[in-house]
Structures are given as structure tokens and as C-alpha cells.
Image (tube, helix red, strand yellow):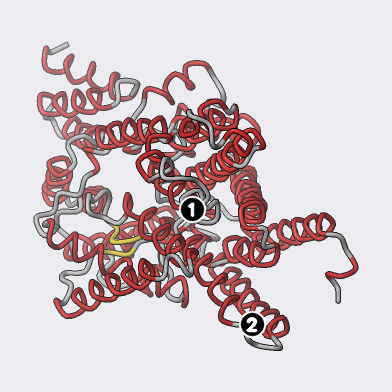
């Protein structure tokens, strides 16, 4: 046997090399992809603070800004570092995403190996994480640095936490009078807390990490079972108060900065969002097992049929009940399932931010729970089979090969904005946001007439989407239809009053057509939301001067 010829340490090194090499190889083509016109201009290509590289004013801005409806200063700083090193060459930005994804893969493998002692199962979970096509969006999209960066700190947090609670000091003094707070005395505990804070400053979706630590206490750390009654659930929760405090603070900050991005369409009542959340859980599971028709934007449907929502609710409830009842016998089922359910809560849409009903990028960390559940479950299922190793190796090879092929195909859609959004429009229905982005992509290569048709269709599908109203208005301006353009631009700024670019462009239109008084109102609105907007300052001065007759 191959494994028999190597020590465990040598096998670990070989597996790490294989994971890194294959991951880098399969994602290598993305280094020659460009930026896309969805978020990349706001995060990188059109962001003056980021383009300036690493500067002290830029770092201060990163910690005080709520731009792009997020507070994630470390993500901003990482983008600044890329611009410092590579300028606006997409190769460098994509390379850093890929390196973070590769590092996350290796950390996940080493983490699971440390916690469970299972070498090959840990490898298989890490390989699924590295090569699953659902994760292409998080890696190939430059703006999703926040995914790979926050996951990096997520892995480091759990590694340090595991070190803190499995150290020799813990084992020796675990029965002492103050044993419930023993981790407070470990430097690894405080290092874990620091990494968690870094994760929150990279992407607030990691707020669920304290709950995942409790799951890991149950399995594989088995801290619920190896100590006396003093180590009950409330003591383990007490131990994590600093983590929960950071979670609470992050939730408050995130809600404040994302208030302007909360989707306010009247159709999205709480009942509708709850129905979408139930359906999304099932859709995420289906895409983990059968990753077809993957898209950057999944639009909200006009309605969810009651029967489908009821089936989804019953299915989720039944699986949860089964895994709870089997928790003592098969603890990995319980941990994997509630890892998946819990880590998706911040992005499941109960509080709706943005226009998407769901998103592939939201599975980057949650899918690990399903991978653990399946890999450990299949291992136990094959325990009684005399050909277990051969069957597992063959089935695993087929699954991983399928993942690599699907990931390679999915990567091709990310070569350019036209290809990405043309694919998105093809695999979804009534996708007004994707049609708008495709229109902007066509606009950028001179296909203005085709772009106008897409903008008009996007407005038809969803009249309350401000970007399509704005883009249609600008397109009509180019075609000389001034009155109709003015109507759409007015609707856009009414729907999105805190968008400085829309306010500025509408003010510019009014200024050019002899209405400096109204133009000044919109320039002031642009500056209220973006004080460091030099063009708005210049145009405001011109508008005020025109009013005074100077």
C-alpha cells in the first residue's frame, strides 16, 4: 500500500503539497481574468482610497468608512496592499485571492486532522472545500477578498482555540476549582480572540463562530463528556463571553452601515423572506450535491408556492430532529448539520441586504459542515464492508474529479463581464440585476443599443431597482431622449437617495439643461454621502455661481 511506505508526518506533508498544487493548478486560468463590473469598481478599480495604495489617510478611512454597505477595514487594507504591490493589474489581485484560498484549504486539513486524528477524511473534506465549484465565486471574484480573508482568520481562530483547550495545562488542571475559566489563562485563547476580531473586520458573516466553537466542544473535542457536572453548557458559554461580546458589537456595526442597503421592496414582507430562507437552505443543499446552473446573482422569484415552502420546512425539521436524536451515537452528524444551518443564518435573508435571494459565495464556510457530515457518515456506512478502502478511494476519486471538471468550467464564465452576466441571464429567470450588469458590460464595448434594451427589460421586471432606472436614464441621454431620461434619473435618485454617483450624475444633467438650483440640491446630496467627492464640490460651486449670476 502507498500509505504504508510513509510515516504519518510524511503523509501529512505529501497531502498538503497535493492539496496546494492541485488547487493552484485548477484556479491558475483566473489569473488572466479581468475585473468585473459588479462591485469591483466600488471595491477596487473605481475606489480612490484603495487605488492610492497603503497610506495613513487610507487606513484611517478603512476603519471609519461604511462604504459598500460594509465595515470591513482589514478587507479594505488588503485591497490597498494589492494596489500598492500590483497597481490595477488584475493578475495580482486574483493571485492573492488564490493564495488565501489555498492557505484556507491547508489550514482546514490541518485543523480537522488535529481535532479528529482522521488523516484521509480530513483530506477529503479539505479537497471538497478547495475544489467545489460553488466556491469559484469566492475565489475568482476580486471583490470577494472578504470571503477568503475572513475564512483565513476563521481557521486560525479555531486552531488556536483547539490548542488552548487541549493543552497540557488544561489536561493537568482541568479538575481544579477554577477549571471552568482555565482557557482564560492560555495565551492561545487570547490569540484565538484576536484572530476572531480580525475575521469580523474582514467580513461580519463570521459572527457565528462562537456557536461553532460550542459545536466543536461537543464533537470532536468532547468537552461535554469528559468533565464533571461543573462543565455544563452554561460554563462553556461563559468561557466564550468575550467572543459573544465581539459578535454583538459586530452585529450592531453591520446593521448600522447596511441600513441604506436593506432591500425595501414592498413584496419582500417578513413572511416572504422567511419562505425564501427555507427554500434557500434546500437550494444550497441541492447545489452542494449537484452544482449546476450556478450564477452570480439569483433573483427573488415573484412568489414561492406554499407546497414547496411547506416541504422545505418539513424536510429541514425532520433532518434536524434526526441528527439531534442521533447526536450521541453519531456526533459528527449533529455538528456538521448545525454548522451548516447556523453559519448561514447571517446571510439567509431574514434581514435582506442587496437584491439576491441567495448567493454561491455564502456557502464558502457553511458547506464545510455538510462536507464533514457526508465524509464521516460515508466512512461509518462502509465500516462493515470488506472492500471499504477500495470503494472509498474509487468513489472519492470520482467525486473529486467531477468537482475539478465543474470548477474548471465555472471559471471560464469569469473571464469577462459580458461572459459572466450572459451566463447568469441564461441560467436564471427575470434576473433584472444581471440584465442591468450585462447592459453595462455591452455599453463598455460600444453596444449601446443592445444595452438599452437590457436596461429597459430590467426596469420592466423590477421598476423599483434603482440601478436599472439610472442606467436606462443615462442610456436615453446618449440617444437624445432628454425628457424620458430625466424621468428615469429622477426615479433612480428617489429610490436610492444615498447613492452619491446617482446624485452627482443627475445634478450634472440638470446643470447642463439650465436648472442650477435643482442641480445644486443633488450635488449637496452627493457630498452629504461622500464628502471626499472633488467633482461634486467643483460642480456645486459652479451651480451656486450660476444661481448668483456670476
Q: Which mark is residue 372?
A: none
Q: Is residue 287 left or right of residue 348?
A: right
State the image coordinates of residue 136 (x, y, percent, origin top left): 53, 61
The numbered mark, 1 or 2, whose residue comes first in the sequence reads 1
The residue to which callout 1 is attached is 225
Image point 53% across, 28% down: which residue?
190
> Can you name the residue that lies furthest to the bottom here?
386
SS type, badge 1: loop
Question: In which quadrant will I find the C terminus?
Answer: top left
* One can see residue 477 in this view: no
Question: In which quadrant will I find the N terminus?
Answer: bottom right
Q: From mark 1 to mark 2, how far is it between C-alphas?
A: 34 Å
* One can see residue 186 in this view: yes
State the image coordinates of residue 493 (x, y, percent, origin top left): 16, 40
Whether residue 119 is situated above or below residue 470 in the rendered picture: below
Do the residues under discs 1 and 2 have CB atoms within 8 angstroms?
no
Q: Is residue 284 left or right of residue 506?
A: right
State the image coordinates of residue 86 (x, y, percent, origin top left): 64, 36
The residue to which callout 2 is attached is 395
Neighbour class for label 2 at 10 Å: few (<14), some, many (≥20)? few
State the image coordinates of residue 195 (x, y, percent, origin top left): 53, 34
Q: Quadrant of residue 472?
A: bottom left
Image point 51% across, 56% down: which residue?
219
Whether residue 544 is situated above or below residue 80 in the rendered picture: above
Image point 31% across, 38% down: which residue?
69
SS type, badge 2: helix
Q: Is residue 543 left or right of residue 228?
A: left
Amino acid at each position: 500500500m502507498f500509505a504504508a511506505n510513509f510515516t504519518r508526518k510524511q503523509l501529512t506533508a505529501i497531502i498538503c503539497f497535493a492539496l496546494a498544487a492541485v488547487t493552484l493548478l485548477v484556479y491558475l486560468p483566473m489569473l488572466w481574468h479581468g475585473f468585473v463590473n459588479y462591485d469591483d469598481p466600488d471595491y477596487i478599480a473605481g475606489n480612490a482610497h484603495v487605488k492610492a495604495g497603503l497610506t495613513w489617510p487610507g487606513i484611517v478611512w478603512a476603519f471609519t468608512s461604511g462604504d459598500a454597505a460594509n465595515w470591513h477595514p482589514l478587507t479594505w487594507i488588503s485591497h490597498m496592499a494589492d494596489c500598492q504591490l500590483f497597481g490595477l493589474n488584475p493578475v495580482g489581485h486574483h493571485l492573492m485571492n488564490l493564495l488565501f484560498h489555498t492557505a484556507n484549504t491547508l489550514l482546514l486539513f490541518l485543523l480537522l486532522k488535529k481535532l479528529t486524528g482522521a488523516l484521509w477524511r480530513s483530506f477529503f473534506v479539505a479537497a471538497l472545500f478547495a475544489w467545489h465549484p460553488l466556491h469559484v465565486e469566492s475565489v475568482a471574484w476580486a471583490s470577494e477578498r472578504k470571503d477568503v480573508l475572513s475564512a483565513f482568520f476563521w481557521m486560525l481562530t479555531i486552531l488556536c482555540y483547539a490548542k488552548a483547550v487541549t493543552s497540557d495545562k488544561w489536561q493537568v488542571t482541568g479538575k481544579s476549582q477554577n477549571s471552568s475559566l482555565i482557557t482564560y489563562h492560555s495565551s492561545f485563547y487570547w490569540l484565538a480572540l484576536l484572530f476572531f476580531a480580525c475575521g469580523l473586520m474582514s467580513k461580519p458573516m463570521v459572527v457565528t463562530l462562537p456557536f461553532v466553537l460550542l459545536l466543536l466542544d461537543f464533537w470532536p473535542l468532547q468537552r461535554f463528556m469528559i468533565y464533571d457536572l461543573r462543565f455544563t453548557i452554561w460554563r462553556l458559554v461563559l468561557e466564550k463571553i468575550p467572543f459573544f461580546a465581539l459578535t454583538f458589537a459586530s452585529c450592531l456595526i453591520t446593521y448600522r452601515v447596511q441600513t441604506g442597503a436593506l432591500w425595501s421592496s414592498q413584496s419582500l414582507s417578513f413572511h416572504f423572506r422567511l419562505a425564501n430562507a427555507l427554500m434557500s437552505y434546500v437550494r444550497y443543499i441541492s447545489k452542494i450535491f449537484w452544482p449546476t446552473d450556478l450564477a452570480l446573482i439569483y433573483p427573488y422569484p415573484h412568489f414561492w408556492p406554499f407546497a414547496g415552502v411547506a416541504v422545505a420546512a418539513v424536510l429541514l425539521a425532520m433532518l434536524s430532529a434526526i441528527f439531534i436524536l442521533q447526536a450521541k451515537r453519531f456526533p459528527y452528524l449533529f455538528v456538521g448539520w448545525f454548522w451548516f444551518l447556523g453559519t448561514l443564518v447571517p446571510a439567509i435573508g431574514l434581514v435582506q441586504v442587496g437584491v439576491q435571494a441567495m448567493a454561491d459565495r455564502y456557502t464558502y464556510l457553511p458547506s464545510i459542515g455538510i462536507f464533514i457530515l457526508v465524509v464521516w457518515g460515508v466512512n461509518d456506512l462502509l465500516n462493515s464492508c470488506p472492500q471499504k478502502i477500495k470503494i472509498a478511494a474509487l468513489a472519492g476519486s470520482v467525486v473529486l474529479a467531477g468537482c475539478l471538471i465543474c470548477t474548471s468550467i465555472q471559471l471560464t464564465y469569469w473571464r469577462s463581464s459580458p461572459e459572466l452576466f450572459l451566463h447568469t441571464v441564461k441560467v436564471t429567470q427575470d434576473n433584472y440585476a444581471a440584465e442591468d450588469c450585462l447592459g453595462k458590460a455591452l455599453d463598455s464595448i460600444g453596444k449601446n443599443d443592445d444595452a438599452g434594451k437590457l436596461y429597459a427589460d430590467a426596469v420592466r421586471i423590477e421598476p423599483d431597482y434603482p440601478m436599472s432606472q439610472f442606467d436606462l436614464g443615462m442610456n436615453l441621454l446618449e440617444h437624445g431622449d432628454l425628457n424620458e431620461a430625466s424621468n428615469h434619473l429622477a426615479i433612480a435618485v428617489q429610490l436610492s437617495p444615498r447613492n452619491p454617483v446617482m446624485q452627482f450624475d443627475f445634478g450634472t444633467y440638470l446643470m447642463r439643461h439650465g436648472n442650477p438650483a435643482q442641480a445644486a440640491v443633488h450635488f449637496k446630496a452627493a457630498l452629504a454621502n461622500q464628502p471626499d467627492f472633488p467633482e461634486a464640490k467643483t460642480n456645486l460651486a459652479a451651480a451656486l455661481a450660476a444661481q448668483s449670476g456670476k
